[in-house]
Image (cartoon, rainbow, N blue to C red):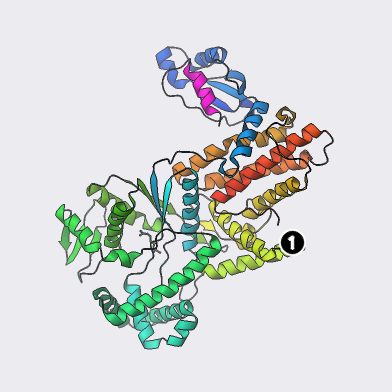
Amino acid sequence: MFEKEIVDALKKKVKGDISLSVPPDDSMGDFAFPCFTLAKEMKKSPVQIAEELAKTIPMPEIVSKITATGPYVNFFLDPAKVAESLFAEILSKKDKFGSSNVGKDKTIAIEFSSPNIGKPMHFGHLRSTVIGHSLSLMHEFSNFRVIRLNYLGDWGTQFGKLIYAYLNWGSAEKLHACPIKHLYDLYVKFNEHVEKDEKFQGFAREWFSKLEKGDQEAVSLWSKFKHYSVDEFRKIYDLLGVTFDCYNGEAYYAKKADSAIALVEKKKLAEIDEGALIVRLGNDMPMMLRKSDESTTYASRDLATLLDRIDEFHFDTILYVVGHEQSLHFEQLFKLASLLGFKQKFVHVAHGLYLSPEGGKMATRKGKAVFMEDVLDETIALAKKTIEEKNPDLKNKDEVARTVAVGAIFFGDLFNDRVKDVVFDLQRILSFEGDTGPYLMYTHARAASIIKKAKIRASKDCDASLLSDPSEQRVIKLMTRFPDKILDALAQYKPHILAQYLIEFGRAFNEFYHKCPCTQEKDKNVQLARLSLIECSRQLLENGLRLLGITAPSEM
Ligand code: ARG
């Protein structure tokens, strides 16, 4: 914020593109203008240029001081004017504060979550779910048209396994009573058999091939399994507050694979290799579009999907929020799409894994899987326990426990750069201290409670020059950065930029809160100014957390 005023002033003295930086240290002002690139044209040293500019630039309203430090021109904003302008903006924009129009007239499709059906939702799919959900919210907030896609893994040989296992060892009653658990047991049992005897692999292939050919028995079982799974997934999404516009999965697009492959063949990009149809894209691994037994592949289904989505959704950009172990697959898919002449922007928003606190991978191992449902239940139970200790009189404890649990999980993930692996430590992410969701939710609730108790209302007409304590100034300064942090997070598809900023903001707010009492303050004008700062901080926290998929309760 306020960058534009400074850039406009600089434009009166400097030609060309002007970009400002944020100095590493508060004592160097709020913005800096580096003069290096001007040296050649002006035939002076950057230090000289900075000195001259500092003296001659017309001072914008919002700026109180301009200095030169070495090759930089430093701009100091006038804290009272900044606060007044911020308060007016936040109190009028409310839940829209921080939004922008960068997405105007643009459509972005975001594919995320995409679990595999016939199994319980694996905990690993949580990362994609959380990151994709947050990116969807941020884009929407910035006025993009957002299309949320869930590419269900509902096709492939694993369904051959399930069908075989169900027909031989399954029970209709168990399937009806506990569908996902029963299917999972069957899946595990099948894999145990394969380990002892390779021929079971063949049974699975046989059944999958029947499924692909439309065999009635196979198709009817498959669609039963699918319905049960999707019902189960929806319960989890409801709990997390996550929604999708389209659930078309691999099976839906498998039917369109032939025409996608035909397009590749028409462009003479494919060749036959040992009976399979492949494309060589210059990587070591060719991309296989059709197996020698004629069945479609993960790659050809994904290509068909992409082409169909381009047609249906008319997006400018599509994001695939998927673990980085699939990087090569997406690299090839995007390359092939551009060879076919598509000009949209394709991005693999890759992420790391969850690791267990002991260091290992949290992955399915012969029945020892970590399931999303179990983790969610455990987190909610723990959150409830903490709330009962901290606030035994709270009315809607169950609801708050759910909100805190979901907030803890979301923030525990989004605080980390998505490309890195994340240790999933339940105790830590649920803690009310440290870099956690509950810490920020609690900070928000604290601000909300002061506002609720106060007899006066926050106002843009308060005297902001009374907010002179360094802790107050720090909060104001950080507040100005909120809109840009959202834009930075968007530009890199990295929600942690916002999450880490919110922690910094929360810390600054708590320091101010402890140092500068509001309700006990005798001077009514000071009280009003502080209360306004508290309300604006609360609003910022509410908005920021919402963009991470977290609801901030006003009491907890
Ligand atoms: N279902 C896949 C998995 O669980 C993820 C799908 C990724 N998206 C895609 N368009 N290939 O591994």
Q: Image quarter for residue 475?
A: top right
Residue 460 placement (x, y as % from top left) = 67, 33
- Between residues 538 and 355, which one lies in front from this camera angle? 538
Q: Vertical placement of 450 versus 166: above or below?
A: above
Secondary structure character of the magenta stretch overall? helix
Quadrant into which the C terminus falls: bottom right
- Work out whether residue 212 can be spotted: yes
Is residue 477 among what the camera can see? no
Q: Residue at x 58, y 54 (%)?
A: 550
Up the image or down, 296 lies above or below 196; here it is above
- Determine the secondary structure under disc 1: loop
| Left/right of residue 254 with respect to residue 398 in the rendered view | left
With 305 as the anchor, is 349 left or right in this view? Answer: right
Residue 34's x, y, as percent? Answer: 50, 23
- The crowding category of the residue bearing disc 1, from other C-alpha atoms within 10 Å (few below 14, some 14 to 19, many at least 20), is few
| Residue name at image x 41 percent, y 86 percent | 170
| Whole-percent x, y for residue 316 in the image | 35, 45
| Image quarter hosting the N terminus | top right
Q: Who's the residue at 51% across and 49% down the image?
A: 417
323 relative position to 486: left or right: left
Amino acid, disc 1 = Leu
Where residue 208 sits in the image (x, y, percent)?
A: 29, 76
Residue placed under numbered mark 1 in the picture: 394
What stretch of residues is rendered in magenta? Answer: 1-15
Q: In the rendered image, which quarter is residue 75 located in?
A: top right
